Image (cartoon, rainbow, N blue to C red):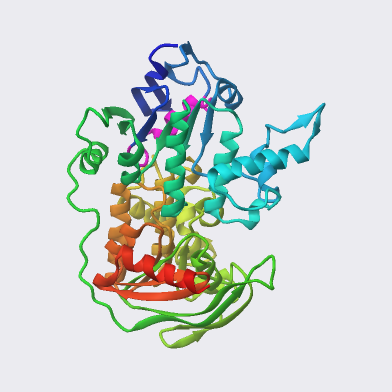
């Protein structure tokens, strides 16, 4: 093997007349963390699908060389046997199976065709410890959150004795502590001779762990930077990604906060599996018209559970408490009731709760608002297309047309479609749960602009985010959540990372 573990040489991939990759080239050395970055739709995932055999040899031009050999993978199995392991942003786990079963799915620990369950659990426990999972290996996937499910995916990849790990936004669902642990793990792997390709939009992660950075824009390789040799800053990376200087990360907004729009009183929620376990404890909060209200907290604090229980009781059992909108009590028993009451919810898990993958962009955008397009006894599809195209242009959704299936979009563009449907629905109280997870800096800016437009028109936005910078940059007011309780409230300039963490630590010490 020569200097490089992997060489990508002039790879071109077409989908009909659309050129998704145009002579892309870069190299990855042994024992290197190589970051691949670019805007959503730049071609990163397409390139990884070529490397992984999802797009088999013969469907693209150019070549890639791994350990000195030209690779002509026909399937994912071929790439895995070679020593390339993928950790995809969208989870590929079976909810009704255990953590251990998912880690070794297709790679079972068996003797003479019979699975050795003792060995499976033992090895799963070792891998779980490596990635920071403290659950029992027999715990079902459906009983753990999205962030911990991502760690299961990482353990699954590590079980295959990989020589090259390819991680697509692996920390997007993790809090800061867990993200740091994962990044430190990649550094440790590097010391052991394992190389990684890290796809991420988190700029601080790039500068923290990268040895080399390759920037892709519109299917082209823009440049490869070496951290030791080049003057690499976040601003330089952003310029390479978007093609110009970007002076501000957050758009300016004049705050015109009005009266209380939505209020939650004495809200209690119990676990849907074990209804003796209380998840949300006597929560009270309010959000005003024209306000961006943040909810901060570590993973497991109960932020998502709170939002989902409010949005049509789509999470939890034995839910009690009062919801008020414009001073009037709401009686919400279903998601349909929530939508009719003017509530919207953008889920952190867009594939499960936010979209219908086999349907078009148009259908996904207009689904909650179909009554707006009914004429007589039928739906006016021309008006649907017109509305969908308006949001396609407004949010810069990269797609050939609104007839394209949402499943074919990059993660960030799919998220923008989901966001569009709630704006179109007329929701004036919108819960956004990690709305910019896995989205590049330019797409984030566009989402922030839409949020600002909504609140300037009198809507209320509840922003749940693990990104402290996002909360500080966007929120008028913020609640801090820990252990299913609201443990602090911060206003304006008080919203600082140190104060948020102080509220969390004070609650943990009180336990």
Q: Residue at x 68, y 53 (%)?
A: 139
Q: Residue at x 62, y 41 (%)?
A: 126
State whether residue 39 appears in this view: no
Does 388 appear above or below 454? Answer: above
Residue 27 visible in the displayed image: yes
Residue 190 point in image, percent of width and height:
44, 30
Depicted 231 relative to depicted 278: above or below: above
The image quadrant of residue 240 is top left
The image quarter containing residue 318 is bottom right
| Residue 401: quadrant of the picture | top left
Where does residue 368 sit, x and y in percent of width and height? 49, 63
The magenta segment is 38-55
Vertical order, 375 against 269 (above or below): above
Residue found at the far front of this picture: 509
Front residue (pair 408, 301): 301
Q: Residue at x 69, y 48 (%)?
A: 98
Relative to the observer, which residue lies in front, 423 or 375? 423
Residue 389, image x and y in percent? 36, 51
71 drawn magenta? no
Residue 203: percent from left, percent from top: 31, 44
> In this rendering, is residue 117 above or below 373?
above
Does the magenta segment cover residue 41? yes
Q: Quarter holding the N terminus?
A: top left
Q: Nearer the viewer, residue 296 or 254?
A: 296
């Amino acid at each position: 093997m020569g200097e490089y573990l992997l060489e990508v040489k002039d790879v071109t991939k077409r989908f009909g007349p659309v050129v998704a990759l145009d002579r892309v080239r870069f190299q990855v050395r042994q024992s290197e963390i190589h970051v691949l970055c670019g805007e959503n739709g730049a071609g990163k995932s397409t390139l990884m699908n070529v490397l992984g055999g999802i797009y088999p040899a013969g469907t693209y031009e150019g070549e890639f060389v791994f350990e000195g050999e030209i690779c002509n993978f026909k399937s994912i199995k071929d790439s895995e046997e070679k020593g390339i392991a993928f950790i995809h942003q969208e989870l590929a786990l079976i909810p009704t199976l255990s953590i251990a079963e998912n880690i070794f799915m297709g790679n079972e620990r068996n003797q003479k065709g019979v699975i050795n369950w003792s060995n499976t659990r033992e090895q799963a426990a070792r891998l779980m410890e490596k990635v920071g999972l403290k659950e029992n290996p027999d715990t079902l996937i459906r009983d753990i959150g999205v962030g911990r499910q991502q760690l299961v995916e990482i353990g699954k990849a590590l079980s295959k004795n990989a020589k090259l790990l390819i991680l697509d936004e692996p920390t997007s669902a993790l809090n800061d502590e867990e993200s740091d642990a994962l990044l430190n793990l990649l550094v440790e792997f590097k010391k052991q001779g394992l190389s990684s390709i890290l796809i991420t939009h988190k700029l601080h992660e790039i500068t923290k762990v990268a040895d080399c950075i390759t920037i892709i824009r519109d299917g082209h390789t823009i440049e490869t930077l070496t951290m030791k040799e080049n003057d690499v800053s976040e601003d330089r990376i952003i310029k390479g990604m978007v093609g110009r200087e970007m002076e501000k990360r957050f758009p300016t907004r004049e705050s015109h906060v009005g009266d209380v729009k939505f209020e939650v009183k004495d809200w209690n929620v119990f676990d849907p599996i074990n209804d003796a376990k209380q998840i949300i404890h006597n929560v009270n909060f309010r959000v005003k018209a024209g306000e961006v209200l943040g909810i901060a907290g570590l993973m497991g604090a109960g932020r998502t559970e709170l939002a989902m229980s409010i949005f049509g009781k789509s999470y939890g059992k034995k839910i009690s408490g009062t919801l008020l909108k414009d001073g009037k009590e709401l009686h919400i028993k279903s998601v349909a009731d929530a939508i009719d009451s003017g509530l919207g919810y953008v889920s952190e898990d867009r594939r499960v709760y936010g979209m219908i993958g086999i349907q078009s962009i148009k259908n996904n955008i207009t689904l909650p608002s179909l009554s707006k397009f009914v004429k007589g006894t039928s739906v006016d599809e021309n008006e649907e297309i017109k509305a969908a195209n308006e949001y396609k242009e407004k949010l810069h959704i990269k797609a050939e047309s609104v007839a394209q299936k949402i499943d074919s979009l990059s993660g960030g563009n799919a998220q923008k479609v989901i966001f569009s449907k709630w704006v179109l629905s007329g929701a004036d109280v919108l819960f956004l749960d990690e709305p910019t997870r896995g989205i590049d800096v330019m797409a984030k800016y566009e989402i922030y602009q839409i949020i600002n437009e909504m609140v300037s028109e009198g809507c209320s936005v509840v922003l749940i985010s693990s990104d402290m910078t996002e909360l500080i940059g966007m929120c008028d007011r913020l609640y801090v959540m820990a252990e299913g309780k609201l443990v602090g409230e911060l206003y304006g300039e008080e919203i600082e990372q140190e104060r948020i963490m102080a509220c969390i630590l004070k609650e943990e010490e009180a336990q």
